[in-house]
Structures are given as structure tokens and as C-alpha cells.
Image: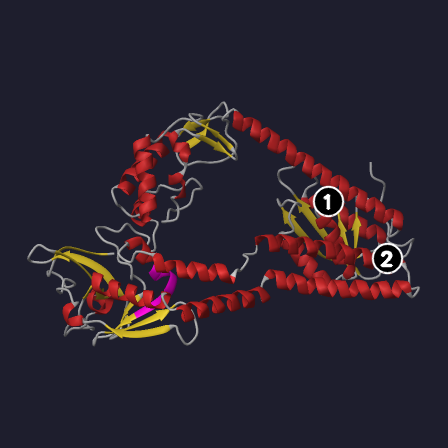
């Protein structure tokens, strides 16, 4: 049984006011509840004569993370000087990870705030501080050991293909702890798959499911982003958990034929426009704009009276019914044949690619941009913080060398060294994730476009998406290409022979059959 905590300093009353911090993790029923922690803290504060002005509490949140709303508010208020003491139940309220707990303690200490514990006696002496560090070590060992036990149990369950808490639409937990098919949900899943591979949009399917009162696995309404589960192999009977993958480890809902049709459809729809393209690709969608009214030009196709299929771009200000006036279309821009405008744009981009001087400029621009971005990056900020800490340590060491050696300077030095270690660790992680810039490699990549086949549709698409930001087509045939890089070379103007490039007017109602918009 823990002994009663001592007063902060002998029998003196604490100078200043205090607050209470309480945290309760719902997964561990042995811990004292929020109410119990608060009651004990109030009794403790009354016993030592400390005035409590506020209570901060985080319910059902683990001490493994500092992303605790009330705890973050406490830290900010402490640094604002709103109180001088924090009363908590045990040291593990500050965080069961020793490093995080020590950093939090140091941050509070730097703000002039001392932490007192109702169930643990850590006075402000060398022995007390050592006991606190030891208890934090115990807390860290406890949570790591518990995590290992949990992981060991979950992996054991996985090898037996048991339910491990992962919900999957169409399944439920059986009485013996395994996955079993939920008949009603499985029927809905099969319906969704058949409608999806037949071409119906996910937004349309979601709207229908909501109208029928059917919810997602989480009990929410459907939207077009609710169908990520369609790619899961569990529906083929494959048990999945972490690195565990067991064929026929759970009951199958979808046969392979339907499952792989769904995967193929997902792959087809995963493109710039987010929908399946039928019969043709329109590479300039989202890039081509009308020079007359400023509206985007949309890729359309249709069959003329002669039976020929035409692919073209039409101004949305002309084809959109809501854009029309009483006297007729707002914009009179003629349609332009898709192949002609796309070939023109492709050739103009290749002019850029074949220009050595311009590619050198692009490489320089990219390098300058990367260096500028790095200055504003997390690494630069961390290095700035590290520099400040290094200066503080250097000044403190000068003071110690001059004979100014007290408990305060020792604690401050330990705090700064801990902070320095934390910042160095963050810098190492950030540098490992940083994308390294190589100018020669960038230039080589740009020049590699020269060997591409401009008749290949995939190469054309890569070329356009890499270089082009916007294209404006005017009535007189002038085409303005705005490239995605900055500087004096980012705009090119030229002319397209519209007389031989315009398509039949298939954008109006009744002028074509089987006409659709991409």
C-alpha cells in the first residue's frame, strides 16, 4: 500500500494554486475512475492546503499518446502561468511511455509547475526524482508487456482464423468466436457487386441503399467513399490479419468470377475523371477551356446521321442546359475534333521536350523549388529548435564552469539534454522520410520523354499530365498552352486550323443518337 504523500516542502503551505488532471482508460477496469481520481486529488489538496481552481480530465484515452485534448489544454495553461501545481493520481497519468512522461514533466517544470501524486510520494529531492524515474520505467514496462501479451493473443487467434475484432461487411462473429456469413448483409454485398460491374456509379448505389434504410457496417449512411471493402480478399474466403494470410480460412461470399470482375472495374474507374471511359479517352478533360466564355470544354461522343461516331470537345457553356438563355445558347463556340486538338497539344509539348535550354531551366526551377520547400519543412523547424537548445546548453555549461552549480542548474541541464535527444530523434526520422533531390536525375527523366511514342495513348496522357496546367482555345483558332512550371517560358501560343478541325454539332438535343458526356 502506498504511503501518504508528503507536502511539497516540509509543513509549508504551497505557494500558488493548483489544478487536477485525471485520465481513465476504459479497457482497463482495474484503474480508478475519473470521479475517484478527482475525489482523491481534492482530499490530497485540502490536506496540504492547496487551492484547486480547475479540473482537466480525459476519459477512455490511453496514456500511450499525448493526443489528449484535456492534457494539451493543461500544458498550454501551464505555460500561460495559470497555476503552479498539478495534482494527479499516479505518475502513469503523465504517460506510460517513460520518455513522453519525462518530457511532459520537464515541460511543466520549465513553466514553473510542479506535479504532485496522490498515490505516490515523490518529493523534490534527488531520491524523490530517482524514485519518479524508476516508477516511470515500471509504467513503461507494464504497458509494453501488456501490448506484447495482447499481440501474442491476437496472432494466436489469427492462426486459428478466429474473429479478432475486425468488422467486415457481410460477416459477423459466430458463437464460437469465428467469422460467419451474415445472410442479409451478404445478399446486399452481392447486389452491390453486380450493380457495380454493370456500370452503375457508386454514388447511385449509395443513394439507393440510403433510401432503403440500409446502413454501412459502422451504422452510418452510405456515400461514394463507403465501398473500400469491395477490394478485400476476405470475400473469396481468404482470412487476413496483419501478415497472416490463410486461404479458405473463412466462409466465402463471392465466387472468383464476380470478385475479379469487381477488381477490374475498380481499376478501370481509377483514373483522372473518376468514371469508366467508354469507347474513347479524352486526355484534355479538366485542362481545356473555351476562350470565348471561359467555360471548360467537355469530351463528348455521338453518332451523326451518317452513322459515323465522332469524338470531340464542346464548350460546357453551350451544351449545359442551365447555361442557355431564351434566345439560344450563351456560347456559340463550335465543337473541335478530339484527335486534332490532342495531337496539336502533344506536338507543342514535344517542342518543349526537345529544347535542351528549356529542360535545363526546368531542372534549375525544380531544384530551386525543392530547396525553398525544404527551408519551410519540418526538418528546418526542428533544426531551428535544436539550435536554440544547443545555445541554452552552452550557456548553462559556462555558468557551471564558472562555479554556479545548483539543483536548479542540474535539473535544467538534464531537461535540455532530454529535449536535445528528442529533437535529434525527430530530425533523424524526418530525414529518413525526406525525398532526396538529384538535378541530374530530374534532367534525365525530362529527356526520357524524347524517346516516347506520341502515337501511344498512354504516353500522350503521361506527357500532358506532366507538363500542362491549362489550355485555352479561342474562336480564331489560337491555342494558348500554360505549362505547369513557372517563369518566362510557361506559356506558348499557336494556331489550330479550326476550319478543318471542327466536328458536327452533336452537342444539341436531338442532333445525335447515343450521345454521352465523360
User: Disc 1 or 2, which lies upstream in sequence?
Assistant: 1
Q: Residue furthest left?
A: 306
Identify the colour scheme used. Answer: secondary structure
Residue 413 versus residue 238 in the image, above or below: below
**Eyeballing the image, is 266 above or below 391?**
above
467 drawn magenta: yes
Pinpoint residue 153: horizontal percent, then vertical percent. Answer: 60, 29
Q: Is residue 264 left or right of residue 241?
A: left
Residue 67 to residue 254: above or below: below
Q: Is residue 256 left or right of residue 388?
A: left
Q: Which residue is mark 2?
A: 410
- Range of residues picked out in magenta: 463-471
Answer few, some or many: residues within 10 Å of disc 2's Cα (few below 14, many 20 plus, some between 14 and 19): some
Q: Is residue 370 above or below residue 38?
A: below
Question: How dense is the environment of label 1, judged by Cα within 10 Å: few (below 14), some, or many (20 and up)?
Answer: many
Q: Position of residue 61 (x, y in %)?
A: 62, 46
Q: Quadrant of residue 144?
A: top right
Asked if one can make out residue 392 in the rendered structure from this viewpoint, the answer is: yes
Front position in the image: 414 or 229: 414
Residue shown at the point (37%, 40%) measured from the top left: 230
Query: Residue 422, percent across and down?
Result: 70, 54
Q: Nearer the viewer, residue 42 or 454?
A: 454
Say whether residue 113 is visible.
Answer: no
List the residue tagged with mark 1.
92
Amino acid at each position: 500500500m502506498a504511503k501518504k504523500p508528503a507536502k511539497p516542502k516540509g509543513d509549508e503551505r504551497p505557494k500558488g494554486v493548483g489544478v487536477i488532471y485525471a485520465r481513465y482508460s476504459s479497457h482497463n477496469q482495474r484503474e480508478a475512475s475519473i470521479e475517484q481520481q478527482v475525489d482523491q486529488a481534492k482530499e490530497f489538496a485540502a490536506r496540504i492546503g492547496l487551492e484547486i481552481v480547475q479540473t482537466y480530465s480525459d476519459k477512455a484515452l490511453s496514456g500511450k499518446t499525448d493526443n489528449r485534448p484535456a492534457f494539451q489544454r493543461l500544458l498550454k495553461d501551464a505555460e500561460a502561468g495559470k497555476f503552479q501545481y498539478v495534482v494527479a493520481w499516479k505518475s502513469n497519468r503523465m504517460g506510460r511511455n517513460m520518455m513522453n512522461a519525462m518530457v511532459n514533466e520537464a515541460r511543466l517544470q520549465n513553466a514553473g509547475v510542479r506535479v504532485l501524486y496522490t498515490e505516490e510520494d515523490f518529493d523534490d529531492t534527488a531520491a524523490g526524482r530517482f524514485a519518479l524515474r524508476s516508477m516511470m520505467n515500471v509504467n513503461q514496462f507494464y504497458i509494453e508487456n501488456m501490448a506484447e501479451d495482447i499481440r501474442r493473443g491476437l496472432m494466436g487467434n489469427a492462426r486459428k482464423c478466429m474473429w479478432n475484432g475486425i468488422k467486415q461487411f457481410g460477416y459477423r462473429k459466430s458463437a464460437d468466436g469465428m467469422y460467419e456469413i451474415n445472410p442479409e448483409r451478404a445478399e446486399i454485398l452481392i447486389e452491390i457487386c453486380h450493380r457495380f460491374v454493370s456500370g452503375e456509379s457508386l454514388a447511385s448505389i449509395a443513394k439507393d441503399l440510403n433510401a432503403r434504410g440500409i446502413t454501412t457496417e459502422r451504422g452510418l449512411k452510405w456515400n461514394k467513399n463507403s465501398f473500400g471493402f469491395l477490394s478485400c480478399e476476405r470475400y473469396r474466403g481468404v482470412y487476413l490479419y496483419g501478415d497472416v494470410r490463410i486461404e479458405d480460412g473463412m466462409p466465402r461470399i463471392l465466387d472468383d468470377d464476380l470478385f475479379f470482375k469487381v477488381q477490374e472495374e475498380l481499376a478501370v474507374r481509377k483514373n483522372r475523371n473518376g468514371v469508366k471511359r467508354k469507347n474513347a479517352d479524352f486526355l484534355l478533360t479538366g485542362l481545356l477551356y473555351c476562350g470565348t466564355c471561359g467555360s471548360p470544354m467537355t469530351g463528348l461522343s455521338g453518332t451523326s446521321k451518317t452513322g459515323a461516331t465522332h469524338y470531340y470537345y464542346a464548350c460546357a457553356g453551350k451544351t449545359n442546359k442551365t447555361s442557355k438563355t431564351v434566345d439560344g445558347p450563351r456560347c456559340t463556340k463550335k465543337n473541335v475534333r478530339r484527335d486534332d486538338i490532342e495531337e496539336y497539344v502533344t506536338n507543342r509539348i514535344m517542342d518543349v521536350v526537345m529544347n535542351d535550354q528549356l529542360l535545363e531551366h526546368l531542372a534549375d526551377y525544380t531544384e530551386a523549388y525543392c530547396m525553398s520547400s525544404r527551408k519551410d519543412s519540418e526538418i528546418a523547424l526542428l533544426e531551428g529548435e535544436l539550435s536554440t537548445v544547443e545555445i541554452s546548453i552552452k550557456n548553462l555549461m559556462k555558468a557551471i564552469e564558472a562555479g554556479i552549480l545548483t539543483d536548479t542548474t542540474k535539473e535544467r541541464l538534464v531537461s535540455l539534454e532530454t529535449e536535445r535527444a528528442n529533437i535529434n530523434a525527430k530530425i533523424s526520422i524526418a530525414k529518413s522520410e525526406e525525398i532526396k533531390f538529384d538535378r541530374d536525375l530530374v534532367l534525365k527523366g525530362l529527356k526520357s520523354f524524347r524517346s516516347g511514342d506520341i502515337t501511344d495513348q498512354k504516353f500522350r496522357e503521361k506527357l500532358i499530365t506532366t507538363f500542362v496546367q491549362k489550355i485555352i482555345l479561342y474562336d480564331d483558332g489560337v491555342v494558348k498552352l500554360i505549362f505547369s512550371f513557372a517563369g518566362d517560358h510557361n506559356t506558348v501560343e499557336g494556331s489550330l486550323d479550326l476550319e478543318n478541325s471542327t466536328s458536327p454539332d452533336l452537342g444539341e438535343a436531338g442532333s445525335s443518337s447515343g450521345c454521352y458526356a465523360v
